[in-house]
Amino acid sequence: MKSMIMTAVVAMAAGSALATGSSSSPFTTVYPNGAGIDKDLLVTSVNSGGIVVNSNRFVYASSITNFDYSGGLNQIRTVRGPWTTNTSPFQKLEAQDGNPHNITTADKQAFNADIRAAFANNNLNNFLDITGGHEWKFEMHFASAIRDNNNGNDNAGELMLFERGSGGANSYFVLQPLSLTGQAIGKSYLVTPEAMQRLSPSRDLPIFDNNGNVAGQQTVEGLLLDLSRDLGVTSLSKLLVRSARAGDAGFPAHLPHGTDIHPDFKIIGIPTPGAAALLGLGGLAVARRRRVK
Ligand SMILES: [Ca+2]
Ligand SMILES: [Ca+2]
Ligand SMILES: [Ca+2]
Ligand SMILES: [Ca+2]
């Protein structure tokens, strides 16, 4: 039984690789509502190490919890436009409780759902937008466990990150896998600007000022992470995402906390063929247990 499953997985992977061909970028994007930096920009498929995964199979955040932040006003927001909101291209942390002049516990609690709304779609014009080097963190729960297709190091990534403006000193932040009970597992990963790859074709996203006007634009780039190689786990259900700080391996000493660190990003899981097969088996096992009860 087991060997038959493995054979099927290998065949699926080989078939996908043959159908793929080569591409300069793993990420394929479109503007469905007309070109323009403030329009929807959808990532429609990813070629993850030769395995093509279409957006209808992406694994999004089912919830975000425990958001926290130590900085001031006008530093953190979700960009959620324009077609999903129309009235405003972004949602500010401080405005969540109805009073935009302070940051309260209610603001922070409500912001969890805002991050989830920005992450749970394939629109790259929906993302978390952070200005300044203040401390922040949140926990991302995936709708289903993401599993590595290969327990060794491989080029088929299971985690996708997209960042607007990843150059310079931007883009440093940390991913830490968590167990279902919230314990750190595997190893942490420092996202760096150097690791980012161009989209196909290359795209820009807007920079909004505090009034919602487009004040500039930056290139959006992407990153594919292999669970075992980059995060030290073979399965991922929960992820701590936090600001980088002195002491994080690889964090440049010349970038002390509080300097020019502006990650603007979203995170999406992708099933690789081995993962899809394993998920199917997991579902069967759960169904059997339910029937026994
Ligand atoms: Ca407030
Ligand atoms: Ca792997
Ligand atoms: Ca993999
Ligand atoms: Ca950025």
Image: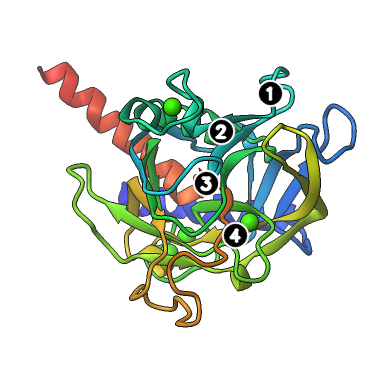
The dot on residue 118 is: 2
Q: Amino acid at mark 3?
A: Ile
**Dots 2 and 4: beta carbons under 8 Å?**
no
- For marks 3 and 1 on the same chain, the one whose residue lies earlier in the sequence: 1
Spatial CA distance of label 1 from label 4 is: 28 Å
Spatial CA distance of label 2 from label 1 is: 13 Å
Spatial CA distance of label 2 from label 3 is: 10 Å
- The residue under label 1 is 88
Density class for disc 4 (Cα within 10 Å; few <14, some 14-19, many ≥20) is many
Instruction: Tell whether 266 sits left or right of 134.
Output: right
Q: Amino acid at mark 1?
A: Ser
- The residue under label 3 is 267
Q: Provide the secondary structure element on which disc 2 rests.
A: helix
What residue sits 89% from the left and 36% below the top?
Answer: 35
**Dots 3 and 1: beta carbons under 8 Å?**
no
Determine if the C-beta at disc 3 is less than 8 A from ligand 4. no
